[in-house]
Image (cartoon, rainbow, N blue to C red):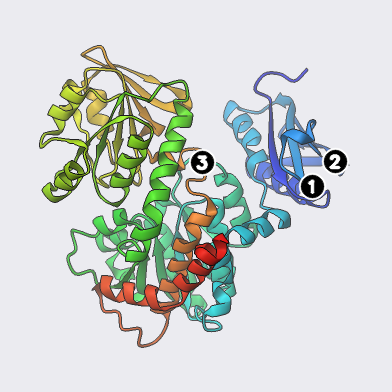
Amino acid sequence: MIPLGRAASIDFRGGAADLPMAFESVIEAIAKVVDVSEVTGDKLDLRVRVGAGGCVRLLGGAPAEPKTSPEDTLVLTMVLEATDGLSSDQIKAILGAVRRVPFTATEMATLRGQMPLTGELPMFAPAGCLSSVAPVLTVHHMTDFLMLVEAVQAMGVPPQAITVLDKGYPYRYTDRVDAHLTRQGITVWPWTRTPDALEDHVRRAAELGRRGLLVDDGGYTLPTMLNSRPGLLPHFIGLVEQTISGITRLEPWPQPPLPIFSVAESRMKATVESYGVADAAIRNALKLISEEKLEGRAALVIGHGRIGEQIAEVLRARRMRVAVYDQQLVRLIAAHERGFVTGRSLSTLLREHRPMLIVGSTGRTSVRGEHAAAIGGDCYLVSTTSRNTEFAIAELVEEAAEVSDAGVLGIRLRLRSGAHATIIGDGFPVNFHHAESLPNAYSDLILASLLVGAATLAALNHGFTPGHNVARSDQVLESCGLLDRYYDLFGPKAAR
């Protein structure tokens, strides 16, 4: 019998030849936690002696019920048979090591099939178009990111010239993605150490005779340099920014000193991505509150921008009674003209509409402590904004009569009115909360656009000036052939 809490397992796809690689990766991860003194057994059943008296057993093979798993599924199981001399933190870290399995050739082939635009872009770009740069990649650690990294290497960047910033979200496969990157020799830093990561990157890039290039999703890098490391700016040629949140974080600097290729503000992204993000966010939120009935109940969407307007429509399609609030009057009028309940006061909408679902999509802080008194019924707060900035959690906690941990669901507040407000995912964006956000076919076009931006800024005479270049970014994205290939894949010819 296995003691409670002393076993962990991971499913992945591959062949029997992939199990030794998986075992090796897990043992390497264990060795970073505690000394490994001996490994014995055969290729499908190993015992690993750790520390003074600990023993870890690793077993691999097919799932017990293959019909309940995808084709080619393998299972690696870890059992802690002895924990003598191990601290509770070491035990937790050892069990977590089972998740550090890089992606197999089978899985990577599947990803290439899901993301043909990103995977094939190096064939359409000039050969070696990134051979002069060293990119810093701050992109969500989901499976689609691996395709972007693979393409970057195919465009002329060796692994040692790449720095990746891990944003620290609880993605479904975050540990596997990190393991895959580090196994290739790519340097991975936590986002909390961005200044150190940038300094280290500049040093390594200089040794390789390359200049830095920022590829960002959420404004992690350029604002950091402008705030605390301005001396690093001359070592970078530009920024490719994926999200509006990243553009918003540059507002304190009306004229940034580097050229910005703005995928975030492009017509391409607005046309293709918004609905997919909204749908994925609501689907993941509903998985977390699957026992709730939605039809006929009230919802409030805060922020009626590209994502917010799609969220409102998705919720209305779920037969909810949807209200919308936006500080920008033109957006509020747009919501009103679409038949949504609207109001000029967020507190009034909270008090009178009594939403059971509150979705924040402003990219800023929308719900503050002052709004807590207006929440009169039990509700869920869901964010689609980068990091945990949409809701002023510290202020809301201050206004609560009681605070409790709701596990994977998030933080539960009992407000002074007696109502319970649950902040899903601790206020982080719900579409990344133990999920893959969008299907890879959705994200393919956007990640390919990031590659187009990188190749553009790496070229001589690219025509981008320091600061924002929205019109020029649109021009490049709409003339580079990427949309033609997208239309060939998903347009009317593909549908027949």
> Which kind of residue does numbered mark 3 sit on?
Ala
Estimate the x, y position of residue 473 in percent, counting from the top left.
33, 73
The answer to which of marks 2 and 1 sits earlier in the sequence is: 1
> Which kind of residue does numbered mark 2 sit on?
Leu
**At 69% across and 34% down in the image, what residue appears?**
9
Estimate the x, y position of residue 86 in percent, counting from the top left.
65, 28
- Structural distance between the alpha carbons of marks 3 and 1: 25 Å
Report whether 301 appears left or right of 189: left
Query: For the N terminus, which image quadrant?
Result: top right
Q: Is residue 99 visible?
A: yes
Where 354 sits versus 476, above or below?
A: above
SS type, badge 3:
loop
- Structural distance between the alpha carbons of marks 2 and 1: 8 Å
Give the residue at the far front of this rendering. 496
Q: Nearer the viewer, mark 3 or mark 1?
A: 3
**To which residue does mark 3 refer?**
435
Q: Pointer 2 and pointer 1: residues touching (CB < 8 Å)?
A: yes
Quadrant of the rendered structure where residue 54 is? top right
The answer to which of marks 3 and 1 sits earlier in the sequence is: 1
Depth order, front residue of 457/3? 457
Estimate the x, y position of residue 131 in percent, counting from the top left.
52, 80
Query: For the C terminus, which image quadrant?
Result: bottom right
Depth order, front residue of 315/135? 315
**At 59% across and 73% down in the image, what residue appears?**
154
* Crowdedness near tag 2: few (<14), some (14–19) or many (≥20) residues, C-alpha within 10 Å: some
**At 44% across and 31% down in the image, what residue appears?**
286
Report whether 7 appears left or right of 175: right
Q: Is residue 156 visible?
A: no
**To which residue does mark 1 refer?**
19
**To which residue does mark 2 refer?**
44
